[in-house]
Image (cartoon, helix red, strand yellow):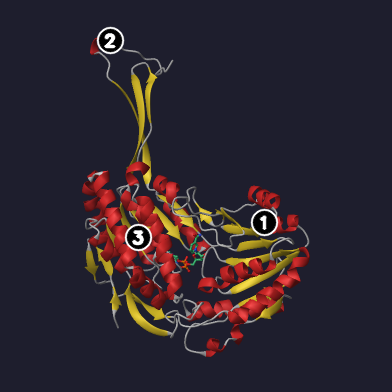
Amino acid sequence: MERINHWIGGKLVPGESGRTGPVYNPATGQQIYEVDFASVEEVDAAVEAAKDAFPAWRATSLSKRTDIMFRLRELIDSHKRDLGLLVTEQHGKVLSDAMGEVSRGLENIEFACGVAHLMKGGYSEQAATGVDVYSIRQPLGVVAGLTPFNFPAMVPMWMFSNAIAVGNCFILKPSEKDPGASLLIAELVKEAGVPDGVFSVVQGDKVAVDRLLEHPDVKALSFVGSTPIARYVYETGTKNKKRVQALAGAKNHMVVLPDADIGMAADAAVSAAYGSAGERCMAIAVLVAVGDIAEPLMEAIEERIPKVKIGDGMDPESEMGPLVTREHRDRVASYMDSAREQGATVRVDGRQDPLYDGDGFFIGVSLIDHATEGMSCYTDEIFGPVLTVVRVDTYDEALRLVNENPWGNGTALFTRDGGAARQFTFDCEAGMVGINVPIPVPVGYYSFGGWKDSLFGDSHMYGPEGVHFWTKGKVVTERWPDPSTSKVDLGFPRTR
Ligand code: NAD
């Protein structure tokens, strides 16, 4: 069985811990690789390589780092399909979607190509008589990124693009479920001219994560994954005096007002609930139908569901692939039974799909209607192709559902009323809002992040907040007085 190794100091390093994990092709259900799990010593070796590389990398001119980021942009772009193939092979999402994720990740590299501008500080001449003040931002040193299974190419790019461009040395700990893309990224990073040790990959599980969380030389960690692990990473990392941002789970609500275009809302709901088999933190998990649009909207969605083509992600005809593991697929399936037991109506049960009984980790799409707040199909992050529908009478009830939900990643409103849309944007408690846009993932020159239990920490990912997260500020106050005017003055420095 082919092994997926670590990448430390600019080369592949086979794991020696004796611990490994299986990587499956979810479309066939077959194990296709064995991935190394790092030991504490192997994580330490990556940190050491990063520490060694840091002084020279941070001293490398902004222009040289810009050249490298431009080259990396071209290399990733020209390997979009290769990266996509690795993602589809191990994650299961369809190839067009996998290549789409690479394109969205590329935005972050493009943004980082502007590092010379992004690192500009401020300057105030004559802050006091003969005194000038300026601010600069400097890299943190050795930093790490811990990523989830659902975007094995894009989420690493969210993190490392800015992290290395501003002068840090970055260690990636990818998801152990689909780690293959991380090594191709590492090769391309090297080919672009990033010095050895500036970008490393340690494969593994909790052992690697815990070592990164406690290693005294790791200054900051960026995490994306489920809420319980995000909370753990945030609490442990900050206790160990590290800067941490931990992006977490979601249960995104799409509110459809009675005046919305039914066809457009149904298209959006089907696309955003079932795309990538619902394994997206920005997927629409809950549809809140306001007033009498509910029944016609359900019918429009039901009409579209049989047309969703489910199959192997490598087949260009497929629109939705399998789930990442059998265990996850079975957990998703269990929500149909609990929804029924708790009184909801399962209008479409994904277990009816013929692929459900095959070897791959497939399940068809599901539609659960008449859900209410206490039901587990409403309270839990299912992270599968399941759309849960809650019917309410008013905008205020819909808004209350959005705002009382413990998660606040994204939310969307479908309407033809500009005033209602503006009010919703003003009122809703979520970090990313779509108006007639079901998956409002910000472009790379804004920042990505949710509110409430969808993010622990105070800065969002990538874009301007990413640059801020990966750097620390320094303010310099300086004067060049005539030494003959110098005298002792015990008063507090004055500016007036
Ligand atoms: P996960 O939390 O299981 O894993 C994320 C990372 O944490 C992986 O690298 C994994 O190896 C590591 N990990 C897992 N268990 C650990 C433990 N006990 N101790 C230390 N580290 C551990 O998440 P996942 O299943 O890979 O990804 C899906 C989740 O990620 C969903 O909840 C989804 O909403 C969330 N997600 C959020 C965003 C966002 O931006 N908010 C984006 C993508 C995914």
Mark 1 neighbour class, 10 Å CA radius: few under 14, some 14 to 19, many 20 or more? few
The CA distance from mark 3 to mark 1 is 36 Å
At label 2, the amino acid type is Thr
x and y percent of residue 93 in the render?
A: 46, 75
The CA distance from mark 1 to mark 2 is 64 Å
Q: With respect to residue 448, does 333 lie above or below? A: below
At label 3, the amino acid type is Arg
Mark 3 neighbour class, 10 Å CA radius: few under 14, some 14 to 19, many 20 or more? some
Q: Are marks 2 and 3 in contact (CB under 8 Å)?
A: no
Badge 2 marks a residue whose secondary structure is helix
Residue 192 vs residue 477, the one in the foreground: 192
Badge 1 marks a residue whose secondary structure is helix
The CA distance from mark 2 to mark 3 is 55 Å
Residue 48 as seen in the image, left or right of residue 327: left
Q: Residue at x 33, y 72 (%)?
A: 82
Q: Are marks 3 and 1 in contact (CB under 8 Å)?
A: no
Residue 12 as seen in the image, left or right of residue 25: left
Mark 2 neighbour class, 10 Å CA radius: few under 14, some 14 to 19, many 20 or more? few
Discs 3/1, front: 1
Q: Residue at x 31, y 66 (%)?
A: 78
Work out which quarter of the rendered image holds the C terminus and state it.
Answer: top left
x and y percent of residue 200 in the render?
A: 28, 61
Q: Which mark is residue 427?
A: none
Q: Which mark is residue 211?
A: 3
Q: Quadrant of residue 485?
A: top left
Residue that label 2 marks: 485
Residue 496 as seen in the image, left or right of residue 349: left
